[in-house]
Amino acid sequence: MEYVSRVPRPPLDRLIDDLYYLEGVPPYARLMLPPAPGALLIVNLGAPFRIRAGGDLESADYADGCVVTMPTRAYEFGYPIPTRSVGAHVKPWGLAPFLPMPAAELCDRPVTIEQVWGRPAVAGLRDRLAAADGPHEMLTLLEQELMRRLGETAGLGLVRHTGSVIAATGGAVAIGDLRTAAGVSSTHLAQRFKSLVGVTPKRLARSYRFTTTMLTIDPAGPIDWGELAARAGYFDQAHFGHEFRAFTGLTPTRYVEVRQRFLREHPGHVLEGWPLPAD
C-alpha cells in the first residue's frame, strides 16, 4: 500500500495530527481498530468501505467517506480491494469546529461525511481530489477545505488546553487538578468535553493511559504483564486485563498473538502497529 502523510499548517496543526493519502490492497479484508484517543475523517475515492462500531451495531457501508469521533470501543473497518482515500488523523477535540452537531451525538456512531458537510460540498471535494495531480496535491486540497471550514468554537480553548495536558501525561493526571487549574467546575469541564470530544476528561485520560501502555508492548519479546500493569499505574494485573478486554475485546495474551500474526504475515507494512486482523 502507498501511504503519504504530513502535518497540516497552523492553525490546523492544533486540531489535526496529520493529513494522509492511502491507496492499494489492504493486508486484511477486515481490520479491528482499538479505541485510540483521537478522531478520524476520511474522504473515500474508491469503492465503499464498511464499518461496524461495536458489537451491538450492524455494519454499514460508507461510499463518500466517514467521520468518526473519539471511540470508546473497538470497531471493525472493512477496506475495499483496492482502496483509495484521503483523510485526517484528528486530535480528540479537533473535529469540533467542523461538526454541525455535538460530538457526543456521534460517540461510537460513525456518520458519512455527506451527513456532516452536505452532498454538494462533498461531491465537489471528491471531484477535485479525483482530478488532482498526485497525493501531495490531494493533501493540499483537503487542507484548503478544512481551512475554509474552520471557525470559532465555544469552549475549544479550555478543552484543547486541558486535553493537551492529559495527552502529555499519557493520562496520568488528576482531573480534579486540571479543573482547579482551569478555574471551572467539574460539571462545566465534563459538559465541554462531552460536547467537543464526545467523552468526559476522565474517559479521555483512561483512553490515553491504555493506548500509551499498549504502544510500549513489544510483541516480539518477552512480556512481564505484572510489571507492565504496575508501571502504567493500574491497580494490579487483573485490572489491566479488564481494561484490555473493555477496550479491545481481547485478552492481553490474545492481543499479542494477533499482533505477531500481522508481523509474520505482513512485515514492515504501513498499517502495522495499531490495526489488527479481525478475521
Image (cartoon, grey):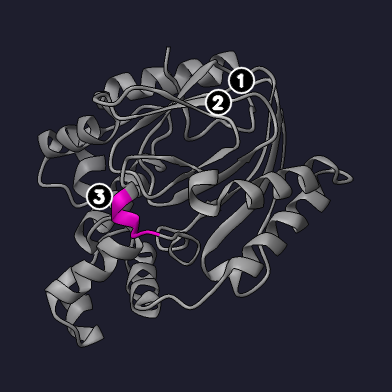
Q: CA distance from mark 1 to mark 2?
A: 6 Å
Q: Residue at x 37, y 59 (%)?
A: 101
Q: In the rendered view of the protein, which quadrant contains the C terminus?
A: top left
**Residue at 50% from the left image edge and 62% from the top image edge:** 98
CA gap, disc 1 and disc 3: 37 Å
Q: Who is closer to the viewer here, 130 or 161?
A: 130
The picture places residue 140, in percent across and down from the top left corner, at 76, 58
Mark with earlier residue (3, 2): 2
Q: Is residue 223 left or right of residue 181?
A: right
Cα separation, mark 3 vs mark 2, equals: 36 Å
Magenta region, residue range: 101-105
Please, is residue 68 above or below residue 220 in the view?
A: below
Quarter-of-image position of residue 73: top left
Q: Which residue is mark 3?
A: 232
In the image shown, does 58 or 262 lie closer to the viewer?
58
Check residue 212 for magenta coloring: no
For the residues bearing labels 1 and 2, Cβ distance under 8 angstroms? yes
Q: Nearer the viewer, mark 1 or mark 3?
A: 1
Seen at 59% across and 67% down, the residue is: 149
Q: Are dots 3 and 2 in contact, CB under 8 Å? A: no
**Amino acid bearing label 1:** Pro
Which disc is residue 172 wearing?
none
| Dot 2: element | strand
